[in-house]
């Protein structure tokens, strides 16, 4: 096993051992290969560099309490990648190929799989990219599907600690009928600059509103939004929001716990009615939000409104309960009644 301080790792591009990949060419996929060089070479004219022809996924493998190794809901990720690939005009791996390559990546990098008893996992990053050198604005005939992984802890360096967020009214995340609901790399590139500004001001997250009217909540820059109001779990219904597998899981767990699940348009003014607010996604699981500031201009100091939920660092009871319920299933500490954990043999 690799010499890693499991309780101190964050979320980064930690170099592991093996990359698993296949190439689409001449209308078919090549044989799946494992590459210990952990690299591949692309022509400078390759369309992924010029036209952002790429999409990716994120999922996790865990060592459970009984020693079993599982991947959490890999078929959901396969289906989401297939949907994104159709949007881009790219061929995508089918369910069996996607899962097999994720399994092989975990096996080949088993020394980087955190043991049970740590708040860490093996983060799996499947990547699909246009690999054909071309300048025409048409989908490529050559594609690479690669699966890599890295040991990962908390995205923000702490589990179940609340952080501040800001609504930057002079920035939008996605256009109506655009790419917002697909996991394409370009969606994230446009958030880097506002994130840099926000982080320098002490905010951990950006909360984006719908681009057309700025009247409704869409999602955070890195993950989905949910709010807790009474016994209701509320999350936005929007064509510009990425369908988060973590959010989907939390909705099912909330229903299991007797909560009412509301997936609907969420007016920005409703932020004043929530008792708790959280960001949710594969990397973060749940990031509770202490307060949300609204800024007409992100770069300026002026704040037009603040919605406060808890003092910085403190977390509400529902976020805590949902986080513990989900992670207990992933770690094998609670019964997996929905069959979310896909077991693999090492």
Image: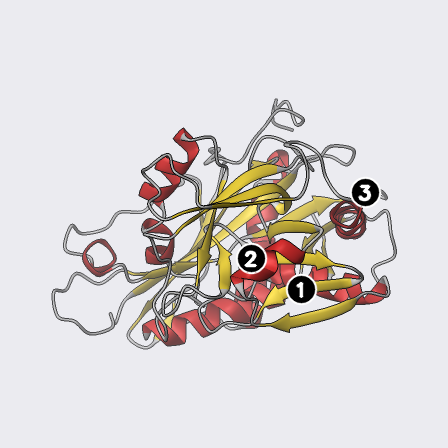
Tell me: 98 left or right of 229. Answer: left
Image depth: mark 3 or mark 2 in front? 2
Q: Is residue 162 above or below residue 331?
A: above
Picture mark count: 3
Tag 2 residue: 224
Image spot of residue 174 (x, y percent): 36, 63
The disc at residue 234 is: 1
Tell me: 332 left or right of 125. Answer: right
Tag 3 residue: 67
Precedes in sequence: disc 2 or disc 1: 2
Q: Secondary structure at mark 2?
A: strand
Q: CA distance from mark 3 to mark 2?
A: 31 Å
Image spot of residue 48 (x, y percent): 25, 57
Image spot of residue 51 (x, y percent): 21, 61
Q: Secondary structure at mark 1?
A: strand
Q: Mark 2, residues whose alpha carbon is within 10 Å: few (<14), some, or many (≥20)?
A: many
Q: Image point 72% across, 39% down: which residue?
A: 315
Precedes in sequence: disc 3 or disc 2: 3
Q: Secondary structure at mark 3?
A: loop
């Amino acid at each position: 096993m690799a010499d890693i301080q499991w309780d101190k790792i964050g979320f980064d591009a930690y170099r592991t051992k093996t990359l698993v990949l296949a190439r689409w060419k001449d209308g078919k996929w090549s044989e799946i290969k494992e590459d210990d060089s952990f690299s591949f070479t692309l022509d400078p004219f390759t369309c992924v560099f010029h036209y952002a022809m790429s999409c990716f996924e994120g999922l996790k493998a865990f060592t459970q309490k009984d020693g079993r190794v599982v991947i959490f809901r890999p078929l959901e990720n396969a289906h989401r990648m297939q949907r994104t690939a159709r949007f881009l005009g790219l061929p995508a791996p089918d369910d069996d190929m996607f899962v097999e390559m994720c399994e092989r990546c975990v096996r080949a990098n088993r020394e980087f799989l955190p043991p049970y008893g740590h708040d860490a996992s093996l983060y799996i990053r499947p990547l699909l990219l246009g690999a054909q050198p071309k300048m025409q604005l048409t989908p490529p005939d050559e594609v690479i599907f690669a699966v890599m992984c890295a040991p990962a802890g908390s995205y923000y360096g702490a589990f179940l600690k609340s952080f501040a967020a800001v609504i930057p009214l002079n920035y939008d995340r996605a256009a109506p009928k655009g790419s917002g609901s697909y996991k394409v790399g370009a969606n994230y590139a446009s958030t880097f600059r506002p994130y840099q500004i926000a982080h320098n001001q002490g905010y951990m997250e950006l909360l984006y509103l719908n681009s057309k009217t700025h009247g409704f909540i869409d999602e955070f820059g890195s993950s989905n939004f949910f709010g807790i109001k009474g016994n209701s779990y509320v999350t936005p219904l929007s064509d510009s929001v990425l369908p988060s597998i973590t959010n989907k899981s939390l909705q099912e767990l909330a229903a299991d716990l007797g909560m009412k699940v509301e997936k609907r348009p969420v007016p920005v003014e409703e932020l004043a009615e929530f008792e708790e607010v959280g960001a949710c996604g594969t990397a973060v699981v749940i990031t509770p939000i202490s307060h949300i500031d609204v800024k007409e201009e992100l770069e300026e100091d002026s704040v037009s409104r603040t919605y406060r939920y808890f003092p910085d660092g403190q977390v509400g009871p529902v976020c805590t309960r949902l986080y513990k319920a989900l992670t207990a299933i992933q770690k094998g500490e609670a019964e997996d009644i929905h069959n979310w954990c896909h077991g693999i043999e090492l």
